[in-house]
Each structure stands twice: as C-alpha cells, then as structure tokens.
Amino acid sequence: MSVKLPISLVVVTLNEEANIERCLKSVPFASDTVVVDSFSTDRTVEIAQKLGANVVQEKWRGFGPQKAFAVSQAKNDWVICLDADEALSPELQAEIQAKFQDLQATVGYELPRRSFHLGRWINHGGWYPDAQLRLFNRQHSQWSNDVLHEKVQVKHKERLKHDLLHWVFSSLSVQVITNDKYSTLGAESLAKSGKTSSLLKLIFRPWGKFMECYFIKLGFLDGLPGFIIAVGAAYSMFLRYAKLWEMEMKKRTNS
C-alpha cells in the first residue's frame, strides 16, 4: 500500500465510466481525490464515490475554467491534474513518490504522454512525447482561462522521465466525433484572434498538416495507424478552416 502524500488528484469528467476507475487507481499515493463532474448520465459519479473521491457537480465552463475550478476544490496545494482517459504508469508513480520531497513550489512538472490508439502505442507523428504539465503547486501556478488549448501558467518547468499513459480514442468513430467538436472550437478561436479563411488555406493547411505528421514527424514509423492519424489530423485542419469560412459567410449574410 502506498504512503499517502499531501497531493490532490484532480479530474474533470463527463460520462467517463469506462475510464475513471483506471485513472483514479493510478494515483494511490494521493491523500485527496477531487472529481468535478458535469452531470454525467452514466456510472461515472457512482464509481468515483466508491473509490473515495470527493465528487462535485458543476456545469461545464470550458476546459481552462473548469480545471481551474476543480483545482480550487482540492485540499492540498500540490495537485496532479489528469483527464479521465489518462493514468500514471507504475514507473511514473514511483518517480513522483521518490521526488516529492525535492519538488519546488515555483516549478511545474511536465509528464511525457504516450497514447494508445488503433491497437498500439503511438510513438511518432507528433504524438510522443507530447509533454503535459500536470503536476504543480496551486499557490504558484494555475490553469489558464482558455476554453480550448488550456495550459498551466507557471514560472519554471521541468520534465519527469516516465510516461503518463493515455487511451485517446476508443474507436475511429469517436475520433471523428472529437475532430468535429474540436474543429468547431478551433474555428471559434481563430475567429476571435482575427484570422480568416480562404481557398488557399483550405487546400494547403490540411496538406501541410499531413506532411508534418506523416513525414516530418515520422508518423509512417507507426505503420497503418500512423497514416490514419495523419489523415485525421489533416481532415481536422480542413474542418477548422471550412467552419471558419462558414462563420464568415453567415456573418456577411446577417450584416
């Protein structure tokens, strides 16, 4: 049994019954577990409560604001923030426990994330090491207010050695649904920053993304899954600029 440390595990959830148990059990040394749930309709809350988590129901605010709220519910200043489809590897568990007494409050600690998709761990195409800053002291660091591409704002960063594990999509259908959702948020973000769409961007941005993922970042070394991932990334980029164009068209029509 792991010795409990003054660290809070913080997770935000919505219908994560397939993942939440694995996630919570991967941080056995946390002395406090907080799950902020956006009114799941499956067994997420039941499972989390059975595992001893403090479950708080909160309407979805956007990624950054929701995670910042979740951190505010923790009992400890040191927090590990995970998504429900993530889990600390046994090696990373041991590394954090061994290093805890030497952690510096003004430093945020990045975890190299390795994702499982299409039957294998993906090691290329920009998917690894995919460092995620998830361990920090909330007195000195906090999530940004970005509703998409949220990040922890810290003074200094250090990277731990061992992997954070990520079960990214349960199927290609889920990936397509996720790409649709995130491309909408991406288009909205582009519009807010004053970016515009064009035929050239619709043609060359997706092609450039495919070349980046499959060739420059060696996605071809991941076999057929690497090719599928690169095509998916290109399609997501296409959707982002197509939706931006659609938003611009509607704005012109309404005006």
Image (cartoon, rainbow, N blue to C red):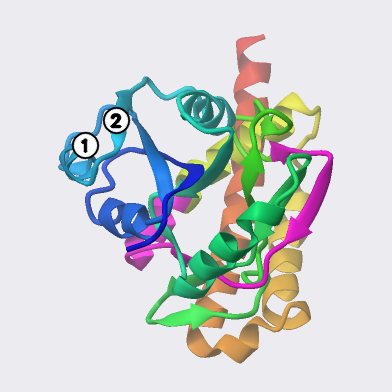
Looking at this view, is 115 or 72 the one in front?
A: 72
Task: List the residue tagged with mark 2.
Answer: 55
Q: Position of residue 245 (x, y in %)?
A: 66, 36
Q: Residues within 10 Å of mark 1 (few under 14, many from 20)?
A: many
Task: Name the quadrant containing residue 41.
Answer: top left
Q: Position of residue 74 (x, y in %)?
A: 47, 29
Task: List the residue tagged with mark 1.
Answer: 45
Residue 163 on the magenta span: yes
Q: Residue at x 15, y 42 (%)?
A: 43
Residue 184 on the magenta span: no
Q: Quadrant of the C terminus?
A: top right
Q: Position of residue 54 (x, y in %)?
A: 31, 31
Q: Are marks 1 and 2 in contact (CB under 8 Å)?
A: yes
* Amino acid type, residue under disc 2 in the picture: Val
Q: Position of residue 184 (x, y in %)?
A: 54, 38
Q: Which residues are magenta?
A: 152-178
Above or below: residue 185 compared with residue 145? below
Q: Quadrant of the N terminus?
A: bottom left
Q: Residue at x 73, y 77 (%)?
A: 217
Is label 2 in a helix, a strand or a loop? strand
Q: Is residue 95 left or right of residue 106?
A: left
* First of labels 1, 2 by sequence position: 1
